[in-house]
Image (cartoon, grey):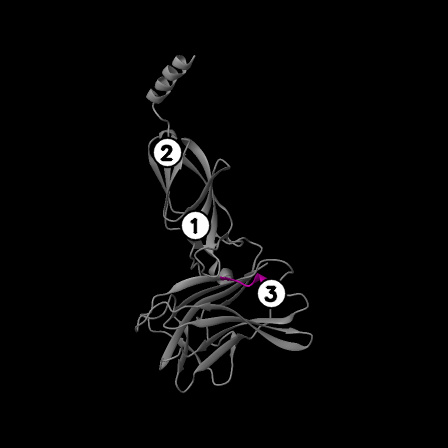
Amino acid sequence: MIRALRYASVILLALPACTKEDLVHSRLRITNPGVATNAAVEGSGSSRITDAWVYANNEALGVWQFPSDLPVLRTGPTEVKLIAAIRRNGYQDDRVQYPFYATWSGNLDLSEDGTTELQPTFQYYDDLDFWIEDFEEAGYAFTPSGDTVLNTITDPTLVFEGNGSGEMYVDTGRTNVRITTADAFSPTANTPVYLEIDYACDQEFLIGFRYTYNGDQEDLPYLNLNATGAGPELPWKKCYVDLSGPMNILGASDRRFYIAVQLAGGATSGRVLVDNIKLVSR
């Protein structure tokens, strides 16, 4: 009996190993996700979709970071679905499904041993509320504090997109500036609320939340965004700021958000450029 088992072991070792790679029938390459909008209602299509939950014929293929080259264990006509993911509050390790982008779906013909290219374009859900400041019209949707000056810049080498972007500037003569939304917000209770913002800056700035509770005005410093670079032409980034918690504080009223800049220690000046500031809720 012992001798027979030894022979069986030899036979098993001689069999070729079967790997996941051997089962792959096709590949799906997903790149360059974007967002299409009704600009008059939803504002800019600026986005930073970093990942997606991927499904083929309703079978989960996992969460993939863009650009992705996915192995798929099927060929032929296949319904592919993508749920867009973002990095909440800009944190690399906080990847979440963005609650306001509708699921992308399409029917693809996956070829055997081939690669199918996909560049998905997402859309917002239809039942959303938007508050937008894109610096394309005269006036601002913010109220400056003290001697704060909010400028509209039109230099095409600095503007993110369109005709204008906002600028907040600090120096040794004006070390703190702050702008607060002129409007107060009353989102549906216990629903997600996100602030989308495109920004370029040579120093840190703060996204904060202001509200009234029991008759007292409260300030909640919420999220610091780091400098994107240095020099006259600053690189732009986008952040999805999750304001669901502050916006759903029980008993709060007069809910507003603000942007504040304090001159960095040792610096003589600082600059923050912003665009496509968008509060999205249901």
Checking the image for residue 26, the label placed there is 2
Position in image of residue 70 (x %, y %): 38, 40
Q: Residues within 10 Å of mark 1 (few under 14, many from 20)?
A: many
Lower sequence index among marks 3 and 2: 2
Occupied quadrant, residue 166: bottom left
- Which residue is labeled 3 in the image? 247
Residue range of the region highlighted in magenta in the rendering: 241-247
Quarter of the image where one finds residue 61: top left
Residue for badge 1: 51
Rendered position, 14 above or below 40: above
Label 3 and label 2: CA atoms lie apart by 45 Å
Which residue is depicted at the point 37% across and 30% down? 19
Q: Is residue 244 magenta?
A: yes
Q: CA distance from mark 2 to mark 1?
A: 20 Å
User: Helix, strand or loop at disc 2?
Assistant: strand
- Asked if residue 102 is among those painted magenta in the image, a careful observer would answer no
Pick the residue in front: 107 or 74: 74
Q: Amino acid at mark 2?
A: Ser
Q: Of callouts 2 and 1, which one flags the residue occurring earlier in the amino acid sequence?
A: 2
